[in-house]
Amino acid sequence: MDWRDGGLCLREDPDLFFPIGNITSGPTALQIDEAKAVCSRCPVARQCLSWAVGAGSVEGIWGGTTEGERRSMRRRAMRRQAQAAA
Ligand code: SF4
């Protein structure tokens, strides 16, 4: 069984996880909060986030994070790796 089969988002409108517009305010921000609330209860959230971070640039809410938040996570991980190698 693939981890995706356990995702709570399978029971939701897929559009909820792909917000369009200004993600910092208004209806889009509320939509993101709603999607993240689903992710916060999801039993496969850790696997989902790990996949999304590793996959690179992926649109939408995955593992309770936005694309921008995952980009920041990747940058922090790269900085830690560079510091460890120095
Ligand atoms: S963490 Fe969120 S996006 Fe990932 S499978 Fe669960 S509900 Fe879906």
Image (tube, rainbow, N blue to C red):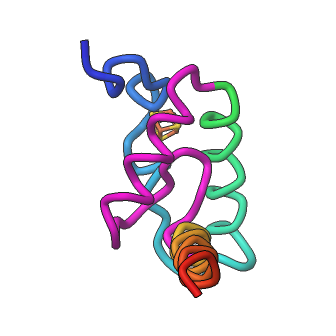
- Tell me if 45 is positioned left or right of 18 in this view: right
Q: In the rendered image, which quarter is residue 72 located in?
A: bottom right
Residue reaching furthest to the left: 1
* Residue 45 rendering spot, x and y as whole percentages: 55, 34
Picture layout, residue 38 above or below residue 32: above
Q: Quadrant of the C terminus?
A: bottom right
Foreground pick, 60 / 78: 78
State how many labels appear: 0
Foreground pick, 12 / 84: 84
* Residue 56 rendering spot, x and y as whole percentages: 34, 69
Picture layout, residue 40 above or below residue 60: above
Picture layout, residue 61 above or below residue 1: below
Picture layout, residue 38 above or below residue 6: below
The stretch of residues the image draws in magenta is 42-68
Q: Quadrant of the N terminus?
A: top left
Residue found 60% across the figure and 83% down from its top: 79
Residue found 69% across the figure and 34% down from its top: 40
Foreground pick, 66 / 13: 66
Residue reaching furthest to the front: 86
